[in-house]
Amino acid sequence: MQTIGNTALPADTGRRAGHDIKKDLLPLLSGAAVAVGAVGAMLALVDLGSPLRAPFTLFFLLAAPGAAIAAALRTLTPLGRAVAAASGAVAVVLLVAQGMLALHVWSVRGGVAAVAAVSALILLPTAIRRPRRRPARRWTS
């Protein structure tokens, strides 16, 4: 005997069966990461004395170039992209610091601004690249 399955979860959850929680969690975590990075950059640029300044600024210094590099390396596998983005982010921060120290222009504000500018330059070609046009999907029944 075949039974007909119920596709709805119990009424207290309010979600359909087959609804993936990961699809809701990824945009939420991405938004939180952007907010933490923006707060870190803001705290460093306006020189506020907060206990959150150091960890949030460090997060910004690693996440901004890492995200830009990851966006540029869209064709790699997820693990390869993560490794390349993390090592590239560290390299960008170290090169910015080394360059500023060599030129005797080091400052925290300047370092944060320079890393943000380099990250924007890395992200710029990816952002202006035209999206590929895909043919319209036809639904057949």
Image (cartoon, grey):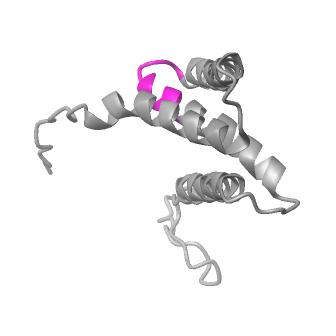
Q: Residue at x 35, y 33 (%)?
A: 124
The quadrant holding residue 125 is top left
Q: Is residue 50 left or right of residue 95?
A: right
* Residue 53 image point, x, y percent: 80, 55
Q: Residue at x 61, y 20 (%)?
A: 88
The quadrant holding residue 49 is bottom right
Is residue 7 or residue 31 the one in the foreground? 31
Is residue 84 or residue 105 the one in the foreground? 105
Q: Residue at x 58, y 60 (%)?
A: 28
* Residue 77 image point, x, y percent: 52, 20
Is residue 82 or residue 102 the one in the foreground? 102
* Residue 62 image point, x, y percent: 68, 35
Outermost residue toward the right in this view: 51
Is residue 141 or residue 64 the one in the foreground? 64
- Give the answer, above or below, for where 134 lies relative to 35: above
Q: How many marks?
A: 0
* Residue 64 image point, x, y percent: 58, 39
Q: Is residue 9 left or right of residue 52?
A: left
Magenta stretch encompasses residue 29: no
Q: Residue at x 77, y 62 (%)?
A: 48
- Give the answer, above or below, for where 139 lies relative to 5: above
Outermost residue toward the front in this view: 104
Q: Where does the magenta region start and end? A: 68-77
